[in-house]
Each structure stands twice: as structure tokens, then as C-alpha cells.
Amino acid sequence: MEGGDRIEESSSVRLLGGSWSGSESRWVDGSEVDSESPPWSQFDDEKEEGKEGFGSLRRRLVKKPKRVDSFDVEALEISGARGHDSKDLSTWSTVALAFQTLGVVYGDMGTSPLYVFTDVFSKVRIESEVDVLGALSLVMYTIALIPLAKYVFVVLKANDNGEGGTFALYSLICRYAKVHMLPNRQPADEHISSFKLKLPTPELERALRIKEALETIAPLKTLLLFLVLTGTSMIIGDGILTPAMSVLSAVSGLKGAVKGIDTGAVVIVSILILAALFSIQCFGTNKVGFMFAPILAMWFFSLGSIGIYNLAMHGFTVLKAFNPAYIYFFFKKNGIGAWTALGGCVLCITGAEAMFADLGHFSVRAIQIAFSFVVFPCLLLAYMGQAAYLLKYPASAERIFYDCVPDHLFWPVLVIATLAAMIASQAMISATFSCVKQAMALGCFPRLKIIHTSRRLMGQIYIPVINWFLMVMCIVVVSIFRSTTDIANAYGIAEVGVMLVSTTLVTLVMLLIWQTNLFLALCFPVVFGSIELIYLSAVLSKVLEGGWLPLVFSTFFLCVMYTWNYGSVLKYQSEVREKISMDFMLELGSTLGTVRTPGIGLLYNELVQGIPSIFGQFLLSLPAIHSTIVFVCIKYVPVPVVPQEERFLFRRVCQKDYHMFRCIARYGYKDVRKEDHHAFEQLLVESLKNFLRREAQDLALESNLTEIEYDSISMTSRDSRVPTGDGNEELRIPLMQEGRFDETGTSSAETAMALPSSVMSSDEDPSLEYELSALREAIDSGFTYLLAHGDVRAKKNSFFLKKLIINYFYAFLRRNCRVGAANMSVPHMNILQVGMTYMV
């Protein structure tokens, strides 16, 4: 849809379902379906058919238009409802952001020269020039192929509106195919402007076949989710191993330089540095980035300078390594030893996944600029300088980094290296926060407290529980392993595993969304997947030598995420089965079988259609119920951000005298929910008033047009007849939009002005005045948040494993996570809870 059409949409009102006295629609089973219709532009083609006056106008009005928000029409006029700044930054802002990436994204990769050649030549002895040149060639082409070719030029472009990581890829796929396990998707969600679905291409037929397979074959959905959860759990595992590896390798330089410094002292110093690192995370990525970026800039400058110094001092023979034939010579000479040395070589690209996972904190252009013009050349110079030194002093492999530093610069470089190693951990810590936030939004991780540390950039967050968990695990790892060799074996498995997951998901994005040429799309996994599989085979051989550690961490987080998702899906399906039928509500009458007292009750639930069963529990448990009831459903849509003016769907439930409404609040997985309950209540009230006024105006206009055209319009027309049987038809209420033109060139607003003033003046509508008066009285009496304290249990006839997962593991996670939808600092006196057991 074009931008102009989108702007026109956002100014109209959406009336969603419901039963009305005198309406031509009726409820059958309480279901409310967000059915869709062609956009208004499709009806503009009728202009060529000639002028038909009010009859033609009404025929267009009664067609279902493309609906936009009704709940949040005036949201941007309310204080605190402004959206967030976009990432369309100026040139200087992009350069500044690129500078920050040095301190957040590239610290891990930048500290790899501390330990790469040390680990490689612990498996292969340096016996000739071929050994050094072959290892250098491996490192150079690994950096050129994986971080540069794969991530900078391909993977970063697969972002989800500026958000990166495995869950961003999963969210992108969920928009194009119904593969999300939680069945709360609505067709109306596709009208959110940030969906940005691409137009068909010649490869559309192939993409549709892939889409159909993903949607119809249940095991494929589960396999895709399992793959995403595996990649995410490995990123969290990286968040544990990266700080331990980086800090321990840097501090180990003290061991040979200062007398009396042994392994125990190195471990203690490393633990103190790690504790300090995790303690400053609460200040936010933005502040940490500005504080760390100058240090990393000095570090990269030192790497490049030391590399140039060693090349000048020890010769330029290492330039031969640009010939990839030396990789072949290296494997031919060393055989199995060369294959095991790949486990050390892969450490040169540790942190490459952070380029994509941390994308939400920065921008694609900033990350590309920093890597291409700073990180890549400095790393090449550093490795070439070390290789030149090793050609002359092959016995220095164990301490190659510090040995190749000029003596008079040893202590300054040691200090900068220690600080850089400390900062290197920031990349995966920030990536871990982003991945956990995305997982929570898509229903795959227990709800945790999230602190947004930047007013300008939404992706910059801090999760206290994850932060302290990572700190404790890092300290445990350093205390147990006490050396970088075993940690390096563990480190490679997690890193390569995440890369393989990214390769698989990006390939699916190419086929399904980008609809790339089949040959080019298959070249991506063939080239990069083959390289990563070779590296994976090498690091898996070290499982018994420390490689088991990331597998344990990944398995733990995979179980947590899959258990939460599995239980959440079963709970939602249980709520759908047990929802209250509309026939029952109609039998109760507008009093709902109890006393209606002034006040507004906000009943939080997860249903996007139907009346939740918990409402029946409130009717049975309370002696009275509020005069106005709003069913509020907080739903996350597979997009990073839902624009504020498109956030809410709003509909009436039952007849007018019930005073019941449904609100579906749609958030992206990157959206910030920082409003307190007062701001939320103000937004709800203002929007509800606007909804009622516009609703009355549209009904009055349709009623008047019906009288004018009574003789010329068939009462059995397709768009106005009573729906038959299935109850899925939507209420036929015209949605007038200011500035909309009919085929005569006259705007609908002008046409409306030609009608009697009594019709168009909503302030004189007695039913509207009554409803607004009742709403004002309810507002004066205050808001009450109606919450369900639900207990989820497996049915008695369930198999043993399901009972174990639901009754114990999922129940434990629910008891210990934060409360759900209404977690907005609501005073306890404003909350009513009713217990309910869901049998799944």
C-alpha cells in the first residue's frame, strides 16, 4: 500500500463486530472474526461507471472497508503517547553510532588476536613456513568469508525493520507464513504498516509452495521453532562463555610478566573484573557504548600499529598467505592435526553473530561502516604481524600476542588489552538481552523485568535477572576451568552452532520472502553452510575437553523456552474451548445476572475473539460488576514496532445497554510498554469517547441514507443481508472518512453536510448522550483491573511426560515469572483476582 493510503486509513474509525438492537447482524456463538475486505482503492474503479448519486455512495459505504484503529484514533494528542524516533539518522549521527559499535558489537572479535594463534599452534607445531602461512591464510579467509561476506553483505539485510537475531528472522517468517505456534493471529494484523509485505515476483509460485508446506505440515512448524530456540539458547550460552574467555585470556598476560602471579591470582583478578563488568550494565548500552568505544578505538589502533611494526621489523613474507593454496599445503602437511587446529582458527570470528544480534541497538549502516573501515583492516594487520613474528621466533607461539609487542609498550598494551577484553563481553551481553526480550514477546520465554535504558533507541534494554545469572555463571566457569584452552573448546561449539542456525533461517528468508533466484539462494547455504559444518565437525571433537559446557547451557535454556511455549499454547487453546457463548450472555440480559455498579472494569485476558471464561468466574464470585466492562487483550504481533496510531483494535460486545467492549492492544516485540496505569487509563477513556461519537455519527448517516435510497437498493444485497448460519459476518456499519471522494468528485464530508443537521450532530443523539453520561459516571468511580490467577494442569488422561512438563516445570515457571498483561504499577487496591484452573 502506498504511503498516502496508509495516512488516510489512520484517520478513520474501525467498528468491530457486536450485536445491536435494530442491526442486521447477529451473534451466533460469541465468536468475533476480524474478517477483511479489499481496500477502498479497489472500489474507486467504479468512477468509470457514471454518476449514481446517493445510491452509489451507499453501495460503497456498506462494503467493508480496510479497518484501522478505533481505540487509539486520538492517541497522538494524548501526553506520553508519542512514538519513538526511527533509525533514519543523518551522516554524522551514523558515524557517531558506528563509533559506538566499536565498544558494543566488535569487542569480542577485536580481542581474538589475544588467543587465536596460541590455540591453533597448541594443536600443530611450527616446523616450517607452511605451518605459519597456512594458519594465517585460514584466519584471513575465514574473517573475509564469514563476518564480511556473509554478515555485512547478506545477513544484515535480512533484518526485521532494523531488528536482528534469530527471533527477528523467525518473526519475519511468521509474517509471511502462519507458522507461529500461538493461534492468535488476525487478518487485521496485516494492515499494520510495519508489516511491509513485499509485492509478488516471478518466483512467487515457489514461495507459495514453501508457505503452504510450512503452514500445513505441523512437524515443520515445530522443527522451525526448535531451530530458532536452539540458536537463541546458544547465543545465551555465548553470553556466558565470551566474558570468561576474553577476560581470562587478557589477564593471563600477567602470569609471565610479573613474578608471583600464578594461575590462582589470574583467576581472582578475572573474577573481580567480571563482577565490575556486570555491575555497570544497569547504566545502559548507550552510556556503556560511549564509555567503552574510545577504549576499543585505542585497542584497534594498537592492533594495527603493532601489526605494521612487526611487518616492518620481520619482513613481508607473510603476504604470501593471500594465496589460498597455502591452506591446501597446511592440510596436506599436518593432516588430522590441521583439522583439530580449526577449533582454534574459528575463534577469530567469535562475536560475528553479535553483528546481527545487536542490530536493534544500532543500525545496519553503522555496523557496516565500523567493520569495513576499522575492524577488518586492523584485524588483518594484527594477524599478519603475529605471523611475521612467528616466522622468526616460532617458539613464541604460547605467548605470541604479548611477545610481539615492543618491550617499552608492554604495560600500556596490557592495560588496554585487559580493558578491551572486559569490553569484549559487552557484545554478547547486549545480544543476550535482545534475544531474551524477543523471545518473551513471541511467547517463548517466561516474563522477566525489562528496563529500557534509552529514551531514543528502543532496542537498548537491561534485564536484571539475566544479567546476574550471566555473572554467576561466568564466575563459575572461570573458577572451574582456570585456563583459556578448555574454555576455547567450549566457545567454538556455541559460536558455530549459532552461525548454522542463522544460515538456515536466512536461506528460508531468501526463498520465502526475498524470492531470490533459486541458484543464488542455494549458493548461500552451500558456500557458508559448508564452511560452518567443517568448523563444527572440528569443534565437536572437543566435547570431552570442555565442549560439553555450551551444550549443557543450551539444553537448559532450550528446555525452559520450549516448556514455556508449549504450556502457553495449550493454555490459550483451553481458553478458546471454554469461552462463554453469546447466547448465554443474551440470556443474562444487560444486568449480567447481577448488580451493575458505577466503575470501569478492565478484564485482562489472552483471547482475541470471544468472551473469556474467567468473566463467568467474576460474575459468580462478585456481588456486583462494573457498569462498563472492557476486555483487554495484550497481543504481540510478529513485527518489531506497531505504530502508536495503529496499536489498538476496538469493538462493542453485545448490545449497547450492556456497555461492554473489547480492546486488542497490539505490540511489536521491540515496543516499549512504559506507561503507568494512569496514562493507560487516560488513553483508554479518550479513545473510547471518540469511538462512541464516531460510531453514533456513522450509524445516523447510514440510517439517513437508507431512507433516501430505500426504493433503489435491494434489501437482499450481498453487503447488507443477514448473515446465514456461521456467525462470521461482520456488522455492516459504514465508516465515513473525511476527505474521501465519491465518483462525482464530491467529498463524502461534503455529502454528509447536505444531510439534515439533526442527523449529523452527534451531540444531539440521545443514546450517545446517555452512553457518554454513563461513561463519565463510571470514570468518576474509578478503574478496577480484573485479573485471573490461573493454575494450569494437565488432564488426568494425559500421558506421563505431558503431566510432568505442565504440572511441574511449566507451573514452576509461571509461579516465578512476573505477572502478565496488567503489570503497569497498578496499586493493589485497584486489582481484583479470581482463581481459575485450566485443564489442558
Image (tube, rainbow, N blue to C red):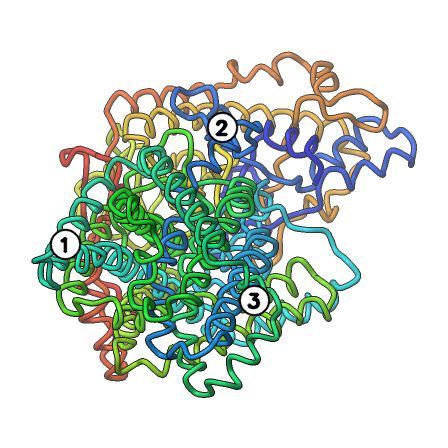
Q: Residues within 10 Å of mark 1 (few under 14, many from 20)?
A: few
The picture quadrant where one finds residue 232 is bottom left
Say left or right for 385 vs 564: right
**Mark 1 sits on what residue?**
258
Give the secondary structure at mark 1.
loop
Q: For residue 77, say whether it is visible.
A: yes
Mark 3 surroundings within 10 Å by alpha-carbon count, few (fewer than 14), some (14 through 19), many (20 or more): many
Residue at the spot of label 3: 321
Give how far across and how far down residue 188 sits, in percent. 56, 47
Under mark 1, the amino acid is: Val
Tell me the kind of residue under disc 2.
Phe
**Residue 591 found in image quarter:** top left
Q: Which mark is residue 691?
A: 2
Quadrant where the C terminus is found in the figure? bottom left
Residue at 73% in and 71% down: 519
Please tell me how many numbered marks the rendered image carries: 3
Residue 379: x, y in percent? Answer: 47, 53
Residue 128 % position (x, y): 46, 77
Going from N to C along the chain, the mark reached first, 1 or 2, is 1
Q: Secondary structure at mark 2?
A: helix
Q: Amino acid at mark 3?
A: Ala
